[in-house]
């Protein structure tokens, strides 16, 4: 049985530090801070340091809680804006 070619895109398993920073809107320096802190795993390949997508996605899902405001505050700020 021979493998069939498909037109489906294959998700990368690694990206460069600049690509990872661009994906989430951080500077490369900020991304490097999270790498040094051990929050994002990387691998060295030759001279390049590559960010592992599985670690990167885990960082986004678990390490960075989204800010949330109580409903009363959201309503109060909206009313003040339109008043």
Image (spheres, grey):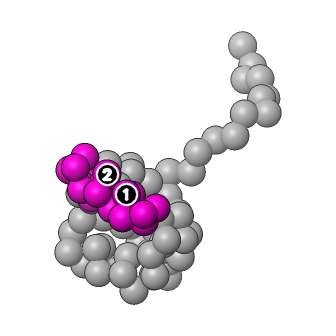
Q: Residue furthest top?
A: 1
Instruction: Answer few, some or many: residues within 10 Å of disc 2's Cα (few below 14, many 20 plus, some between 14 and 19).
Output: few
User: Which of 34/26 is in front?
Assistant: 26
Residue drawn at x 46%, y 82% is: 27
Q: Magenta segment, which residues?
A: 64-83
Residue drawn at x 49%, y 71% is: 25
Residue drawn at x 46%, y 61% is: 82
Q: Name the image quarter holding the C terminus.
A: bottom left
Residue position for label 2: 75
Q: Name the image quarter holding the N terminus.
A: top right
User: Does dot 1 land on a helix, a strand or a loop?
Assistant: helix
Predominant SS along the magenta part = helix
Instruction: Answer few, some or many: residues within 10 Å of disc 1's Cα (few below 14, many 20 plus, some between 14 and 19).
Output: few
Residue position for label 1: 79
Can residue 62 be seen at all in this image of the molecule? no
Quick check: marks 1 and 2 in contact, CB under 8 Å? yes
Q: Residue furthest bottom?
A: 29
């Amino acid at each position: 049985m021979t493998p069939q070619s498909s037109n489906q895109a294959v998700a990368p398993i690694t990206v460069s530090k600049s690509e990872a920073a661009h994906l989430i809107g951080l500077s490369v320096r900020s991304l490097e801070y999270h790498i040094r802190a051990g929050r994002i795993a990387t691998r060295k390949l030759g001279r390049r340091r590559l960010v592992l997508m599985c670690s990167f996605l885990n960082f986004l899902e678990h390490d960075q809680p989204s800010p949330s405001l109580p409903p009363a505050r959201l309503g109060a700020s909206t009313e003040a804006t339109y008043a």
